[in-house]
Amino acid sequence: MSAPSETPSQVAPRSERSHRRPISSWREHHGWSAAVSLRRLAAKPVGSILTIAVMGLALALPLAFYLLLSNVQSLGNALGRNQVVNVFLKPEQVAGNAQLLARQIAQHDGVLSVTVKSPQQGMDELSKMQGFSDALRALDDNPLPYVLEVQPQDGISADAAAHLVEDLRAMQGVDMVQDSGTWRQRLDALLGVGNRAVLILAGLFALAVLLVVGNTVRVDITSRAEEIGVLKLIGASRAFVRRPYLYAGIWYGLFSGVLAVALALAIELALAEPVARLSQVYEGKLRIGGLPLWLLLSVPLAAAFLGWLGARLVSAWQLRKAA
C-alpha cells in the first residue's frame, strides 16, 4: 500500500513553521541587538552620559528659541500690537452718519469691533487730563469730531492692517486715520527673522547630532575591529554586524531627545514666576504659553531617527572600508 498523502491541514503547519523560523530569528536578533547596545552604553557610563548631554543640550537650544518666539506674539499683543485704529470724522458729520459708517466698517474683513465716541465723550476725557480743564472752559462750543475706535482682529498681519487703514482713509466722511502700523510691521519683521533663525538653528543642531552619533559609532566600530572580523569570517552579513550599532544610535538619540524635553520644561518652570509678575504689570493681558504637547512628543522620536541615521551612514562606510 502506498503511504497516505498529507492533507492541506497537515501541510500548512509545516509551511508556516518554515516561514516563521527566519522571521523569528530576525526578531530575536533585533531584540538581542537592542539589548546588547544598551548594555554597551551602560558599560561606559561616563562617555555615554557626556555624549547624551552634548546632544541633549544641542536639541534643547532650538526648543528654547521656539518657546521664546512662540510667545513674542502674546507679548506683542500685550504691548499693543493690535492697537485701536482711531478714525476721525469730518466736523460736519452727525451722530447718524457716524453710526452708519461704524456699521460699514464692522463688516470689513479684519475688524473685530467698532466703537463710536461722541464729541462730548472726547471732551469729558480731555477734561480729566491734567492741564486741559481750564483751557476747555474757555471754549464756546465743542470742536471735537466723532471718532470711531476700530479694533482689528487678533493676529492680523501687517499687510492686512495696512490694507484696512487705506480702506478707512478712502471712506466718505473720514478726515484722518490714526494708526500705529509701524509697530505692527516691525513686530512681523521680527517674527519672520525669528522663524527663519529657529529653522536654521534646528538644522544646524540636527547636523550636530548626526556628527556626534556618527563619530561615537565610528570609534566603537574601530575598537571592535577584531570582533567584527571574526563575525565576517563565520559568514555574518554587514546588516547583521551593524545592527547593534544602529540601535546604539537610536538609544543615543532617544535619550538625548528626552533630556532636551526635560531641559525645555525646566526653562518653562524657571520662567514661570517672572512671567507671572510681568503679566500682573500688564493687568493679565500677557499670556505666556508653553511648548505644545505634539512637539514635546516628537522631539525624542526625531532625535532617535537622527541617531539611527548617523549610525547607519557611518557604520555602512566603516564596514565597507574594512571589507
Image (cartoon, rainbow, N blue to C red):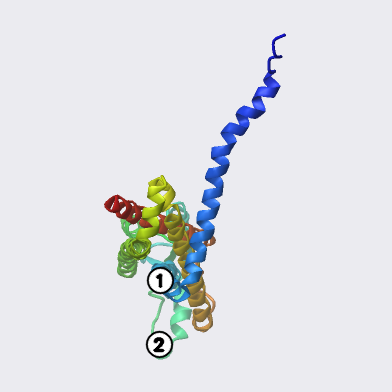
Kind of residue at disc 2: Phe
Callouts 2 and 1 close, C-beta under 8 Å: no
Residue 228 lies left or right of residue 290; in this view the side is left
Indicate the quadrant where residue 101 lies: bottom left
Residue 110: % across, % down:
42, 55
Residue for point 54% across, 61% down:
293
Q: Residue furthest top?
A: 1
User: Which is more toward the observer, 62 or 142?
Assistant: 62
Q: Residues within 10 Å of mark 2 (few under 14, many from 20)?
A: few
Q: Which residue is mark 1?
A: 51
Residue for point 50% across, 81% down:
270
Q: Earlier in the sequence, mark 2 or mark 1?
A: 1
Kind of residue at disc 1: Thr
Question: Is residue 131 something one can see in this rendering?
Answer: yes
User: Which is more toward the observer, 191 or 16?
Assistant: 16
The circle on residue 91 is none
Q: Which residue is mark 2?
A: 132
The quadrant in which the N terminus is found is top right
Indicate the quadrant where residue 57 lies: bottom left
Residue 223: % across, % down:
36, 65
